[in-house]
Amino acid sequence: MADLKEAAARKEILLLQEQLAKAEERLVIAERKKQEIEFELTGKLKKLEEENSSLLGKTNHFESLKAEKEELNEKLKQAEQQVTSVKMLENERDALKTENMTILKELEEMKSTQDDDLLQEKVESLEIIEKSLRSELEELKKNKEIVEVELAGLRDSFENEKKTLKSENEKLLKQISLLEKISSDPQSTASKDYIAVIRGECENAIKAKEEEMEAKLKNLVRDFCIQMDVKDNDCDKMVSELLEKNHDLEERLVKEHRKQISELQQNLFEKECALDEMRDNYEEALQEKEKKLKELQSTIKKLSESSQVGLNDIPTECSDWDDTWAVPDENMDISSPTACNESCKEHLQQIESLQSEVTKCNSEIKELKILLRLSPPESMVNSCRNDPSQSIPEPTEFEYLKNIIYEYMMGKEPVTLAKVIAAVLRFSDLQTQQVIRREEARHSTR
């Protein structure tokens, strides 16, 4: 009876050993699958980390571009507010400065238009970059979702495989425990020792695999954290470099703008000084011409009075001569009437010469009056020169020249205005004479 039991126990032990061998084989196969899955998961995790870091870099670049766009929009709004305030100040100025401020307004609008065009081009380029970044971001999000789904599936399969192995291990442990209970006979001590050894080996192998998996998982997490820190530092460095470059660019543009403004102010101040000097010269010449005109008019008046008295005395003298010499002699001296006529002719010639000189003076006075009428008022020039708070002085000489050209193009006194334009633009004497001859010839053919 005991032999039968021992034989049955041996058969069961052999069966258990076979099952244990099969379980070990399945465990080896499961371990291989586990390693393959871990390798595949590691590769996908690295790929996901790279895509995530690239996505973070592009997101930071997008944020920096967005901030730069907002800053440019703010500067554009400030520029528009400044232009609006300048326009409001221009509308409040005196009516005498309207035409002068028209040129200044046109210059400012041209400059503002150029700045707006540059800003618009930069904004459009930023919007294009923003759209491309958004499309890349969407694509990366989709790839991330796909990778997350695959990773979740791999994790589920890994957990299911782990649960299967764990359940099989538990079954084996239960069978071993049942065998230990069945083989309580002292003769089965060797079998118990063998089973205990196999059980210990299985438990140690399972424990080692679990520890190895945990260690690999910790290493992956640590490597991922290190890579993320490195990417964060690179992004911070890139942002700081961009901010520094932007600051340097702003400082350079501000310096160039200030330099251009100072040069324009100096150039305009020199032109205003020349215009003041020209105005003073014109006023002095006008005063001299007016004084000379008065003297000539007084002289003409005196000569006219004396000539009229002489002409009135001629008939009286002739009648006296008729009474005295009723019958004239052939040898009579007739030099007195001839001398009188010559004297009258001389007076008439003097009067004509004086009248031509008066006409010439009137023409010069008319030119000077046109210059003074077209030139800007003295108060405007002084206000432009004495007001240091005004950032951009008024271009008075340009306005003056514009008024002259306008009058010339309207056909008002072309010869006189041609002389004035030649004087303002500092033509040479030869050029001035050619222009005047051309205008006189064209005016005479009409």
Image: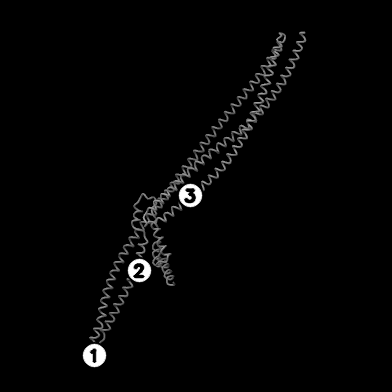
Q: Which is nearer the N-term, disc 2 or disc 3?
A: 3
Left or right relative to 222: residue 171: right
Residue at mark 1 to residue at mark 2: CA–CA distance: 53 Å
Q: Which is nearer the N-term, disc 1 or disc 3?
A: 3
Task: Please state the horizontal and vertical placement of residue 100, each as a whole percent of the image.
Answer: 39, 57
Nearest to the observer: residue 253 or residue 304? 304
Residue at mark 1 to residue at mark 3: CA–CA distance: 103 Å
Q: Within the image, what quadrant is residue 279 found in? A: bottom left
Disc nearest the viewer among 2 and 3: 3
Task: Please state the horizontal and vertical placement of residue 166, each as a whole percent of the image.
Answer: 66, 21
Q: Secondary structure under badge 3?
A: helix
Q: Is residue 211 above or below residue 413?
A: above
> What residue lies at 50% left-to-right and 38% top-to-bottom?
239
Q: Amino acid at mark 2?
A: Ser
Q: Of the numbered discs in the image, which one, if any, rests on residue 363?
A: 2
Q: Secondary structure under badge 1?
A: loop
> What residue lies at 56% left-to-right and 41% top-to-bottom?
134
Residue to which mark 1 is pinned: 326
Q: Of the numbered discs in the image, which one, if any, rests on residue 116?
A: 3
Q: Within the image, what quadrant is residue 105 found in? A: bottom left
Nearest to the observer: residue 325 or residue 259? 325
- Give the crowd class for mark 2: few <14, some 14-19, many >=20 residues within 10 Å: few
Q: Of the numbered discs in the image, which one, if any, rests on residue 365?
A: none
Task: Please state the horizontal and vertical placement of residue 151, each as a whole percent of the image.
Answer: 63, 31
The quarter of the rendered structure image containing the C terminus is bottom left
Q: Secondary structure under badge 2?
A: helix
Q: Amino acid at mark 1?
A: Ala
Q: Is residue 420 above or below residue 321?
A: above
Residue at mark 2 to residue at mark 3: CA–CA distance: 50 Å
